[in-house]
Image (cartoon, rainbow, N blue to C red):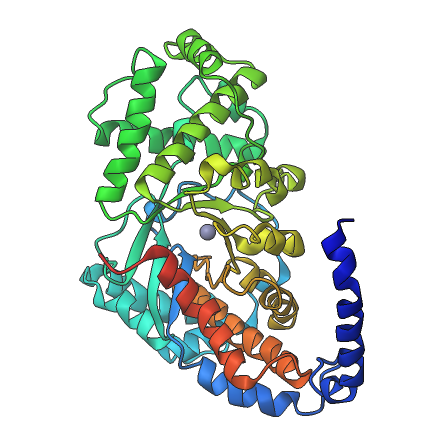
Amino acid sequence: MNKQRAWRRPWISLLCGAVLLCGGARAAGQAKPLAGADVPQIYERLLKQIDRIPIYDNHSHATFPDDSDMDAMAAPPGESSVLRLRDDNPEFVAAAKALFGYPYGDFQPEHAKWLVGKKKAAEASGNTTYWDGILDKLNIETCLANRVALAPYLNPKRFRWVFFMDSVMFPFDNSSQTAKNGDMGVYVPLQEKVLQRYMKQGGVSGLPSDLAGYEEFVRRTVRDNQKKGGVAMKFEAAYFRSLYFSDPPREKAEAIYAKYHAGGVPSEDEYRTFQDYIFRVLVDEAGKRHLPMHFHSAVGIGDYFSMRNGNPLNLENVVRDPRYSNVNFVLIHGGYPYTLDMIWMTAAKNVYTDSSLMGYYVYPSELKRILKQWISLFPERMMFGSDAFPFNDAVGAEETFWLASRSARTAIAAALAELVSEGAFSEQKALELARMYLHDNAAKLYGAQP
Ligand SMILES: [Zn+2]
């Protein structure tokens, strides 16, 4: 201990004494562990204001159900669904009533065709007013659309494109990847299709002859997608492999590329090493282009999704790497069920998360619990996301937009009402925090409209 600190000690003791003497006055200001009986009234007041906040949706798949560009992957057949997303959830009927005045109380085929007909007619009209109207009804101002390509029926002023980049990690013979399990049998051929599409887009007829050529193709694809309006790049890598990316030297990747670009099946180790290297190229390009990187970072669909591989803590070595401090990482779906780990990942200034997917996997009471924890820690890093997605021809992205946005507005109002009642902060501060979650954090991250 140095002399200066020893000299300061009596003053610190005096200060502590003064604080203790003032303890009575301070006690009234300390938050309580139990909320009071006023929670329902505070909730009603807050919800009225929160309903007026225009939403900036960090993640959706705005789409008609027959449009295969809605995602770079598809659900494997027969996958199990959580309770809330099953066809008989009465909330979906409530959504269809609120959005379209659906006159029935269930989705029996003879009833559902009323709704399917309405949506088919909107799709046939081909204009953008339909989806703008859905956003207007839900007070969603802007929405990121994570799709293989932005659809002509989506207004680019309201729907901003997030493109997929996993496909460039699958340039070789993928037969051993595809054969791993039934899920990979569905996912990997779809990645190959996206890669083919990017090669066509880039005017490339076959794989370049060396790694330098392939890297240039990868970087050019990112730049082209950004020019087409892309505001972020998305990775569904958690479905295919571990989110842990090592940092292999270029020579290793170069040798693997030379060995397999013209044919042959790489070993598991070789493929992973190559993917780790190309991933690092993408992170570098994301930094140069100021493009946030989105990651699926939660449980996933399918029967073979690895919880261990998909755990967002796997990304710690990347998001905490000072070389990438210029890259914004957005770990979507809140890392669910690792939501507490997730919010601590966002302690770094360039890491964000959102409540997409889990906002409709769980009911609002559970979402409230998670949002209460998050907003008490790093409110600048959390965003709303709907993960709006069509489940069938009747229950579409429209109904999931409704379910996700209603759940989030009510859950954040309830979380904040409890905190206000517990004495954590004022109602005014609560509304400020709600605006950050529902709109401002995302608006700041993605900047002004193009
Ligand atoms: Zn999604």
- Residue 307: tell me if it is visible: yes
Q: Is residue 357 above or below residue 324?
A: below
Residue situated in front as seen by the camera: 403 or 94: 403
- Lateral position of residue 201 relative to residue 244, left or right: left
Depicted 53 relative to depicted 207: above or below? below
Which residue is at 33% across, 12% downward? Answer: 210
Viewer-proximal residue among 392 and 347:
347
**Which image quarter: residue 123?**
bottom left
- Residue under the image location 55 percent in, 41 percent down: 320
- The C terminus appears in which quarter of the rendering? bottom left
Residue 178, above or below 125: above
Q: Nearer the viewer, residue 208 or 318?
A: 318
The residue lying at 49 percent from left, 13 percent from top is: 252
Q: Measured along the vertical axis of the image, is residue 391 above or below residue 227?
A: below
Residue 81: percent from the left, percent from the top? 60, 54
Instruction: Report the side of 34 relative to 154 (left or right).
Output: right
Residue 277 in percent (x, y) is at 46, 23
Give the residue displayed 45% in from the left and 29% down from the top: 280
Label tally: 0
Name the spot of residue 287 as percent of width and height, x first.
37, 39
Q: Which of the 4 quarters of the picture holds residue 219?
A: top left
- Taking the image as drawn, is residue 106 in sight? no
Q: Position of residue 194 (x, y in %)?
A: 34, 33
